[in-house]
Amino acid sequence: MEKKNKRPEMIKYVLLTVFAVAVVVVGCLYATKNAMLFTGQSGSNADMYLTKVDVILSHEEYEDEYTPGQSLMQTAVRFTCHVIYGEKKGESMVATQYYDDLTGKSGIPVEPGDWIYVYPMEGSGDMMAGFFFRIKYLAVLFVILFVILLIFARLKGIATMMSLGLTILSVFFVFIPAILSGYNVYFWTILVCLYSIIITPPFIGGFNKKSLASIVGSVTGVAVAGALTAVMNSMMKITGFADEDDVYVTMMLGEPIDMRAITFAAILIGALGSTLDVSMSIAASVWEMHESTGKSDFRSLLASGFNIGRDILGTQISTLVLAYIGSSLCTVLLYVGYTPSLMQMLNLEGVIIKIFDSLIGATTIILTIPFTAIVSAAMLAGENKVSLISEGKRSFRIGHNG
């Protein structure tokens, strides 16, 4: 009987996975038709090779005067390496790694066995070291995370990784190529958000009213975030040019990219993560309260959802704000060090966008909690009454027959 109950659920997961993957594949094919992806338009860096360091030949330090009266201590590490990927696989090269005491505290000299990119220096035949190949260590960390998640959450852990992976794929293989193809940023932002909202709750919570309540709460929260962002962008006259990287983005395509739309997309996608988190937490809490205590009246379930929401509200907002501060710490240090006054710093567009992002995320969390609680309570209200009546009838029949 147990296996029969589990089989339909497994079929639903398989169908959801097929649907989610198909959407990403079709979206990717459409979005990449005109996209400028990995075209190699980066000068000498187009001829970059992934190599493995064999032997360190020399390690030299010398003083270099870069402005009158000011000098830097330069370091040059010369080494042999061989190409481990691509057309020149197996070919040996001699390359040099350069760094100075401006970055020396964070500059890490190469060692035998390191994987590092090298590329030809302009105007000479020498090879210069680029950045280290780090993704393999992230892959190891990912495997460790997956194993821990599998031990703790079992099949739920696999479902969690599936939903996360598909959301990331939709961003990198559909949303970003769509922007680089010149498609409407607002439209594709909404599509990607809806895609993530539709697939994530069923993967994590199953195919039930709990997941449906989470979907409704998430849609409401993201809609509020989108409306607030659009209104505030207009009122604060946001241009989207927060730093020099934004200028480079506008020059990537033949026609300028709408940076206000990019700001809208960044804020909405950032709010999406916290919205999904909160909506599923509230829906799951109300569901658990309903299952464990037998509460079936709307007011009791709603009160439980609100009480739990108030408890998690502070930590969720703190997590969100601290995450934004941590991710932009270098920018904050730069602005504080080079801006004449606090008021001027707070009015810089780069700072305004970060604060704006945090406030939109916090507002979305606050509004998602009651929406999800109301929907969850409305869906579950009165369920136990039906089950109790059925159970009573069944007990009566058994007693009567006995």
Image: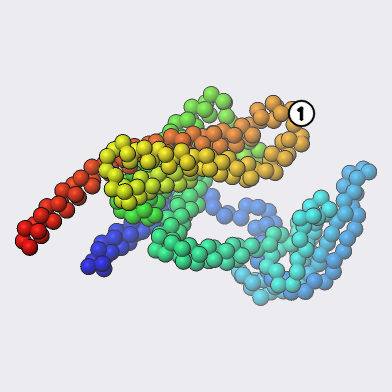
Residue at image position (89%, 52%) is 64
Residue at image position (26%, 67%) is 2
State the residue position of label 1.
Answer: 340
The quadrant of the picture occupied by the N terminus is bottom left
Apparent side of residue 63 relative to residue 378 in the rendered image (left or right): right
**In-front residue for pair 23/158:** 158
Say few, some or many: other residues with alpha carbon within 10 Å of mark 1 (under 14 / 14 to 19 / 20 or more).
few
Q: Residue furthest right?
A: 69
Apparent side of residue 279 relative to residue 318 in the rendered image (left or right): left
**In-front residue for pair 332/55:** 332
Where residue 300 appears, as percent x and y from the top left, is: 32, 39
Where residue 211 appears, as percent x and y from the top left, is: 34, 49
Query: In the picture, residue 97 is in which quadrant?
Result: bottom right
Label 1 is placed on what type of residue?
A: Pro
Residue at image position (57%, 29%) is 238
Q: Residue furthest top?
A: 235
Query: In the picture, residue 20 is in which quadrant?
Result: bottom left
Query: In the picture, residue 22 is in which quadrant?
Result: bottom left
Where residue 400 appears, as percent x and y from the top left, is: 6, 58
**In-front residue for pair 32/56:** 56
